[in-house]
Image: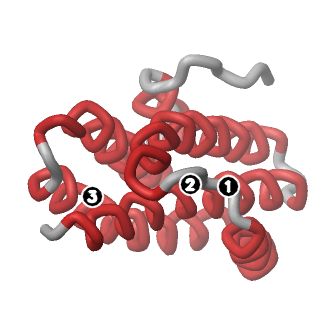
Amino acid sequence: MNPTEYARQIEAAFQGEVQGAAMFHDLSERLQDPEHRYKLRVLEQLEIETREVLRPLAERLIGTVNDGATARKTGIAQASALAAMPWAKFMHVFRREVAKFVAHFEELEKAGPADDSRVLAALTAHERALQSFSECECSGASANSLEPVVKLLRVVPTR
């Protein structure tokens, strides 16, 4: 992968974390079920922490990076579209979408420079945790669905 494309993909990943955090935050504010709200706050924290893991790499490659207003607006628009969906349907949609991100970031991890392997592995691990979460939710194992996510967090939101 050429350096320009690599930098573009890292910036896109960074903005994707901004978008995801905004989506989970806004969606958690719209839901009534306290357990679902909590789960989304935990997912939001994962997005925030992953964004901060990515920040030094993104800044090394492209200079100063900001939490893009466009990414935040897109996340909020996604939350609006998803808010009326029943939880089970949202989880099925989410599982399908996150599978695409897992595949993408596995490829990026393989193609990226060895010097960036720790950050790229963290990015992939975060997507795999989201995938495991959604698979548990879809299979009815929701009581333990947050475990793979919580294992990656430095700060776990309180209930």
Residue 152 circle label: none
Q: Which percent across, then down, holds residue 129?
A: 39, 41
Q: Earlier in the sequence, mark 3 or mark 1?
A: 1
Q: Which percent across, then down, holds residue 49?
A: 57, 34
Residue type at mark 2? Glu
Secondary-structure class at tag 1? loop
Instruction: Specify whether residue 140 is in view.
Output: no
Residues under labels 3 and 1: Cα distance? 21 Å
Q: Is residue 30 above or below residue 150?
A: below
Secondary-structure class at tag 3? helix
Q: Tags 1 and 2 in contact by the CB under 8 Å rule?
A: no
Residue 66 circle label: 1
Q: For label 1, count other residues whose C-alpha is less than 10 Å away and answer few (under 14), some (14-19) or many (20+).
A: few
Q: Tags 2 and 3 in contact by the CB under 8 Å rule?
A: no
Q: Residue at x 14, y 47 (%)?
A: 113
The residue labelled by disc 3 is 105
Q: Is residue 104 left or right of residue 56?
A: left
Of residues 154 and 84, the one drawn nearer to the viewer in this rendering: 154
Residue type at mark 3? Phe
Of residues 76 and 147, the one drawn nearer to the viewer in this rendering: 76
Q: Quadrant of the C terminus?
A: top right
Residue type at mark 1? Asn
* Mark in the foreground, 1 or 2: 1
Q: Residue at x 74, y 58 (%)?
A: 22
Q: For label 2, count other residues whose C-alpha is less than 10 Å away and answer few (under 14), some (14-19) or many (20+).
A: many
Q: For label 3, count other residues whose C-alpha is less than 10 Å away and answer few (under 14), some (14-19) or many (20+).
A: many
The residue furthest front is 63
Residues under labels 1 and 2: Cα distance? 12 Å
The residue labelled by disc 2 is 17
Instruction: Specify whether residue 1 is in view.
Output: yes
Q: Is residue 82 above or below residue 113?
A: below
